[in-house]
Image (spheres, coloured by chain):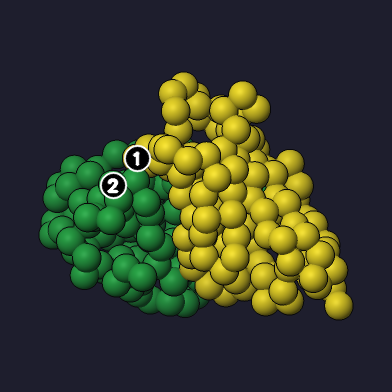
Chain colours: A yellow, B green
Amino acid sequence: AQSVTQPDIHITVSEGASLELRCNYSYGATPYLFWYVQSPGQGLQLLLKYFSGDTLVQGIKGFEAEFKRSQSSFNLRKPSVHWSDAAEYFCAVGNTPLVFGKGTRLSVIA
Amino acid sequence: DAGITQSPRHKVTETGTPVTLRCHQTENHRYMYWYRQDPGHGLRLIHYSYGVKDTDKGEVSDGYSVSRSKTEDFLLTLESATSSQTSVYFCAISGGSKGEDTQYFGPGTRLTVL
């Protein structure tokens, strides 16, 4: 069965610091992988996606993610966090329908 | 972003009453989904549709039914609402020209069952 694990429920980083959010998945084949972001009171917005090809994918808002098949991971990174990045982040895997992780809440401090 | 609207955006109702939430899309996407979001649980799939009149259950379908009589509309019905169905409900769509499996989400409906 497909599953997604986001090991960190809550992460706090300082503004300007680098960020890495972890995502591990279980899937029977090469998966489609996604990261979404949700600001408070809002719907989910697609940050980036991996279908095939280059394992390092670029997304919106300066985010990137790297697919590592050997580690079954798809970690999200950003080199310098801005206060506006404070939100909840969801990793998702699969086909139709997707399976979502439980999310990681990011807090940004000055 | 995809044209997805949900109505109502907020609703307060009483236990035992029927409730219908509507999702409307203007993108002609094939697939439509209903999720609920609760603290500590992330997003959980309730039902989804892969075409007009074609639907399937998700992981938390008990107490919910759906209907899709037109491509653009996907209705979620709580036949007899319970307090455990207090949640935020999100509709999503996929299957458009930009990518079969990319899901786009609506703004959500906050439902409170007293």
Few, some or many C-alpha atoms within 10 Å of disc 2 (few <14, some 14-19, many ≥20)?
A: some
Chain that bears disc 2: B
Residue B110, disc: none
In the displayed structure image, the side of residue A100 where residue A52 appears, left or right? left
List the residue tagged with mark 2. Answer: B100
Q: Amino acid at mark 1?
A: Thr
Few, some or many C-alpha atoms within 10 Å of disc 1 (few <14, some 14-19, many ≥20)?
A: some
Q: Position of residue B48 (x, y in %)?
A: 32, 46
Q: Compared to B50, does B93 lie above or below? A: below
Residue in the picture at 73% in, 68% down: A81
Q: Secondary structure at mark 2?
A: loop
Q: Secondary structure at mark 1?
A: loop
Q: Compared to B50, does B96 lie above or below? A: below
Q: Give the quadrant of the C terminus of chain B.
A: bottom right
Number of the front mark, 2 or 1: 2
Of the pair A110 and B68, the residue shown nearer to us? A110
Q: Give the quadrant of the N terminus of chain B.
A: bottom left
List the residue tagged with mark 1. Answer: A96
Residue B78 appears in the rendering:
yes
Residue in the picture at 64% in, 44% down: A75
Evaluate if marks 2 and 1 touch, with contact meaning CB atoms under 8 Å apart.
yes
Q: Amino acid at mark 2?
A: Glu
Q: Compared to A102, does A87 lie above or below? A: below
In the displayed structure image, the side of residue A12 where residue A58 appears, left or right? left
Name of the residue lying farthest toward the front: A54
Q: Position of residue B37 (x, y in %)?
A: 55, 57
In the displayed structure image, the side of residue A16 where residue B18 appears, left or right? left
Inter-mark Cα distance, 2 to 1 = 8 Å
Residue in the picture at 61% in, 24% down: A70
